[in-house]
Image: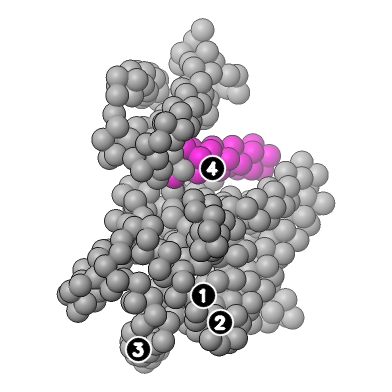
Amino acid sequence: MRVDKCTTIDFMIDILLILAMFEKIQYSVFKLFDLLAIVFVMVVGLILLRDKVLIRDNNIKIFTLAKLALLFLYVLQGSIVLIDGSADIFDQYYKGILTSGIMNTFVVFCTTIYLSVYYKTGIEQLLIKFAKIGGINIIYNVIQYFNRNIDDTIFIRILHSSVSRYGTDAYGAGVGRLTGLFTDSNNNAAFLLIYFIVIYILIKDSIGKKRFFLNCLLVLSGLELILTYSRTGWLGLAFCIVFIMFKEGLFKNIKLVLLIIVGFALGIYAYQNSFVFNQVMTARLSGLNGENSHLEAARNVLGIIQQSPIYLLIGVGVNCLSVHYEALYGRVGMKAHSLYLQVLCEEGIVGLILTLIFWGMLFYMTYKVAMCEKKLYGLPIIVATFLVMNLTYDSAFQPIYFWILTLAIIAYREKVLDVKTNLLVN
């Protein structure tokens, strides 16, 4: 066996193992098994650095299989601990890192390799674009992390001293929220960020009626998020507006910049004095914390929807009801993580329709690409699979899925349209 012929899968597994073990350290559940795994990964990493090799061939080596087995042992270990009743310690670690982070990131890397091999653009170039997209998302997640802490610390805990903490720490954010690889289901603005950027890229390549339709979709999506009073939605919308203004060189227009700032300031003022905000505050001021505070918020959200049918159209800006509605009806411990139900609660019927239109556009685009390029039939299958998965889990809230679709769009533009895509450079 020649250890200097490493595949991209080896490099990817090394990164994922390090991330998984780092998360375990955060939860103070580090054991001898994890120490041996770190040594194993470090040895392989040193081999990679020594030979300056990431890709040599497509053969699966013995230590590649060993590392894959190690990943599955982590999954098994997490499952056994959950069965033993220590779910409080391992809950976020198991769900966020193993079932979402590792497996989803594996799909992203495989898709990246798949696109680069077919288009013969070189995996380095495609991974650079992948890193840029990820960089945008990481910047956003860092902003959101501090936004949630500032909001909870200043506007909630100081102005309402009796409130229990109900923010970033309650969701086990840690390294997950800062990297954007393992996002909480409440973090829909990370999804929104890629949502806007993908539509923006599509608009740039469209003409006539299609471009008009996409512009209308973009505007309606923004208005929908404003009406929901969603904190994460607003932050994502603001970040997307800044991104588009940067790309179009609109920061030179001082009047436009001031108008946007004033608009957001008025919006925040309206949010702080809204009926929805006051109802959600009732849960926070109740002195409850953790799961109980979520259930209390869900009860208030249900009352809001029952009081006015308008909230069925525009949503209520929070998804506690979608996550905990089964527990409200006596089935404690059951959580329905459905993307469509979450969007319906957060953004109403209008938001759900807009989301389905967007997904339909992406599916149609990848289907057309597959018809032109027969070897890319896997792309519409990926989209269709996620559409089905979303019935029972909030998979589309994972931004890495949109990294896949954005990479597909980039590859299609550069191959078929002969248009170079620079996400961060005008």
- 364 or 411: which is nearer to us? 364
Q: Which badge, 1 or 4, is on the more N-terminal residue?
A: 4
* Image spot of residue 180 (x, y percent): 41, 52
Amino acid at circle 3: Asn
Amino acid at circle 2: Gln
Q: Which badge, 4 or 3, is on the more N-terminal residue?
A: 4
Residue under label 1? 302
Residue under label 4? 104
Residue 117 in view (yes/no): yes
Residue 98: within the magenta?
A: yes
* Image spot of residue 419 (x, y percent): 63, 60
Q: Secondary structure at mark 3?
A: loop
Label 4–label 3 contact, CB within 8 A: no
Residue under label 3? 273
- Please give the range of residues in magenta: 96-121
Residue under label 2? 306
Q: Residues within 10 Å of mark 1 (few under 14, many from 20)?
A: some
Outermost residue, front side: 330
Secondary structure character of the magenta stretch overall: helix
Q: Which badge, 3 or 1, is on the more N-terminal residue?
A: 3
Residue 333: within the magenta?
A: no
Would residue 312 be found to the left or right of residue 426 on screen? right
Would residue 95 be found to the left or right of residue 224 on screen? left
Q: Residues within 10 Å of mark 4 (few under 14, many from 20)?
A: many
Q: CA distance from mark 2 to mark 1?
A: 6 Å
Q: CA distance from mark 3 to mark 1?
A: 20 Å
